[in-house]
Every structure is written in C-alpha cells, then in structure tokens.
Amino acid sequence: MTIRAVVRGVGHYLPDRVVPNSEFETLLDTSDDWIRTRSGIERRHFAAENQTTSDLAARAARAALADAGLMPDDIDAIILATSTADLTFPSAATMVQAALGMTRGFAFDVQAVCAGFVYALANASALIASGQAQRILVIGAETFSKLMDWTDRSTCVLFGDGAGALVLEAADGGGTSADRGILATDLHSDGRFKDLLYVDGGVSTRSTGLLRMQGREVFRHAVEKLAQTAHTSLEKAGLTAADVDWIVPHQANLRIITATAQRMQVPMERVVITVQDHGNTSAASIPLALSIGRQRGQIKTGDLIVTEAIGGGLAWGSVVLRW
Ligand code: UT7
C-alpha cells in the first residue's frame, strides 16, 4: 500500500482590476501586437493598492475548501508558494492561517519564484506520504505588480497578480501509475544563473527592490529544461508523454508553452492555456490554470496531468499527478 496525496478540492481568486495590453501603449514604447506576438499575453489582473498576497491567497484557499467540502480546522498544514509575501516575516502562510480562523496545524511559505508551486506540491506530497499531515492546503499566490519597474517595457508588460489553491488529502493507493494523486516529482535549481532573473532589493538593501530579467536567456533555459524535467518525472512514474491527458504548464510565455509541448510530442489540444488572460503570475500560474482547466471542463477525475515550471534561481521542476 502507498499513501498518495490526492486532490480533493481546487479554487482560485483573481483581483477585480483587469489591465489590457492597450493600457501600456499609453505609458511606454510598446504595442498590443508586440506583447501578444512575443508572449501570448492579452490582459492581466492587478491587485488593488491595499490588497496583499495573503488576501488573494486566503480567497483562493476558501474557494478550494468549499470545493472540497471542508472547514479550515480540517486542514493540518498550509504551504504557500510565493515570492511576494506581505512582509519579510512572518510567512504569508501564517497570515492565511489567521485569516481562515484556523487554530491548529502549521503553515509556511515556499520561495522558488515561478517554480514555487511545483516545489510546494513536492513538499506536500512528502509530508503526506510520511504521515506528518493528512490534509494540506497548497496555495500559489503573488502580487508581482508590486515588484514592477513601470519604466522597463521588457518586464512590466509580462506579469500579473492572482492566487490558486489545492486541497491535497492522504489516500491509499496501490503503488502503481493507475493511482490517483501525486505520482512523481522532479526538482532542480542552479544558482549559477541567479542573475538572469532577480529582484534588486531585500533585507540586505533595506528596500523591496524591483524585478530584473534577461528575458531571452531565461527563454532559452526554459525551452531546454522544461521538456527534460517533464520527461524525467513521467519516467519516475513509469509513464510516457503518450499517457498525458493535460500538460498544465507555468504560464509565462505562449511560445515557451508551445515549444515544450512540441518537444514532448503532446498536441496543443492537450495543454491548458491561461496566459492570455493572466500574464505571468509566477507561483500562482499553475494552480490558477488547474482551477480554470477544471472549471472549463477540461480536467476530469482520473486525468493524468504534468505540471512544469521554471523561474528565478534558476529553479525548475515538474510534477506528475492523476486528478
Ligand atoms: O516566469 C519566469 C520565467 N520567465 C520567462 O519564462 C520569460 C522568458 N522570456 C520571454 O518570455 C521572452 O524572452 C520575452 C517575452 C521576455 C521577450 O521576448 P523575446 O522574443 O525574447 O524578445 P527580446 O528580449 O529578444 O527583445 C526583442 C526586441 C528588443 O529590441 P531590439 O534589441 O531587437 O531592437 C527589445 O528591446 O523587442 C524589444 N522589446 C519590446 N518592444 C516592444 C522588449 N520589450 C518590448 C516591449 N514592447 N514591451
């Protein structure tokens, strides 16, 4: 018998303010056409001035709990993937715990930038498999709009805000790839590439800082590494790309998503795509895409899903799960 971390509920939250590409045309030397053609992005949501990452995360968490038919105190742990925690400390996860009125369990943040949700799923799966938790809220939430340099056209048009959440629950499996739940994970980082994508502030500078990215270089690594990690995690699960019902990729750039699917030889009809509506929401992009894929009727119980992501660090990885 194998203990699996099975999805019991899913939900998301997007802030009210929708910003179309055309809004940037009035501020910068850019165009709707450039943004669409180079990234696939058409619009994104931005949080209100007084809305924090934990606010977005708590709303997504409530939606996932409602979908699971559970109360906050049914949860043993909260893992929140974010690089835009409200404060330097305490963790945004403990703020979500308080907002939900949860009086038991434990909560912590995972910081692996755009790969954060994949890292959080791997941690949640390990905690459940080792018996340390039965039910875990795994959230990805970001307010990257607060890290944008509005004079840098090569970054500020790409990112958006949002949150998505899953409730994972321990369930007995047969130990085969037919089980529901998380079947395999594959994580990597290589700090030699830390200067390709970073925020130029933090505790050491007594300021929050702004996002800096060498987009073309990150693009190159993404195309090379994402198909590779997806292949590795499928192999660990005893599966191949032919078994995949849905790729649910990190939503940074439609060209990266397409190139990865091509390398995996998975047709685009089996890829969940939300980048046009959300932009790059970093650690929130995969749970948002899972929630919306489910809402659209794309993802169904028993479907085999591969998620993959890469971001600052560089940090990257993938998860194979049966919904
Ligand atoms: O989620 C974390 C991981 N991040 C990513 O995955 C992002 C990876 N990178 C990308 O998605 C792409 O590299 C970008 C969308 C950021 C850029 O696309 P690109 O095809 O790599 O363009 P580029 O950076 O090579 O720039 C091409 C041109 C440049 O002009 P020159 O030097 O050719 O004259 C840029 O200055 O486009 C120019 N440019 C813009 N033009 C209009 C850059 N940003 C803009 C803009 N509007 N917003």
Image (cartoon, rainbow, N blue to C red):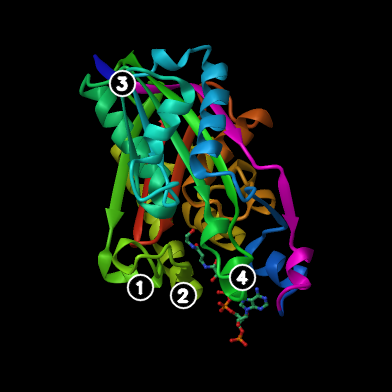
Q: Nearer the viewer, residue 198 or 89?
A: 89
Residue carrying label 3: 105
Is the residue under label 1 in contact with that under label 2 (CB below 8 Å)? yes
Identified by mark 3, the residue type is Gly
Label 4 or label 2, whichever lies nearer to me, is: 4
Gap between marks 3 and 4 measured at Cα: 40 Å
- Badge 1 local density, few (<14 within 10 Å), some, or many (20+)? some
Spot occupied by residue 56 in the image (x, y as percentages of width and height): 55, 38
**Residue placed under numbered mark 4 in the picture:** 150
Q: Which mark is residue 204?
A: none
Q: Residues under labels 1 and 4: Cα distance?
A: 20 Å
Asked if labels 4 and 1 touch by Cβ distance under 8 angstroms, the answer is no
Q: Nearer the viewer, mark 3 or mark 2?
A: 3
Whether residue 293 sits left or right of residue 25 in the image: it is left
- Ligand 1's quadrant: bottom right
CA gap, disc 4 and disc 2:
16 Å
Q: Amino acid at mark 4?
A: Trp
Task: Read off the residue under disc 1.
Answer: 195
Q: Which residues are magenta?
A: 4-28
Q: Residues within 10 Å of mark 2 (few under 14, many from 20)?
A: few
* SS for callout 1: helix
Task: Answer with the quarter of the image where residue 240 lies.
Answer: top left
Please tell me whether mark 4 sits on a helix, a strand or a loop.
loop
Q: Would residue 238 be seen by someone viewing this image from the given angle?
A: no
Do the residues under discs 3 and 1 have CB atoms within 8 angstroms? no
Q: Nearer the viewer, residue 212 or 318?
A: 212
The image shows residue 246, relative to residue 206, as above or below, that is: above
Visible in this render: residue 283?
A: yes
* Residue drawn at 58 percent across, 58 percent down: 159
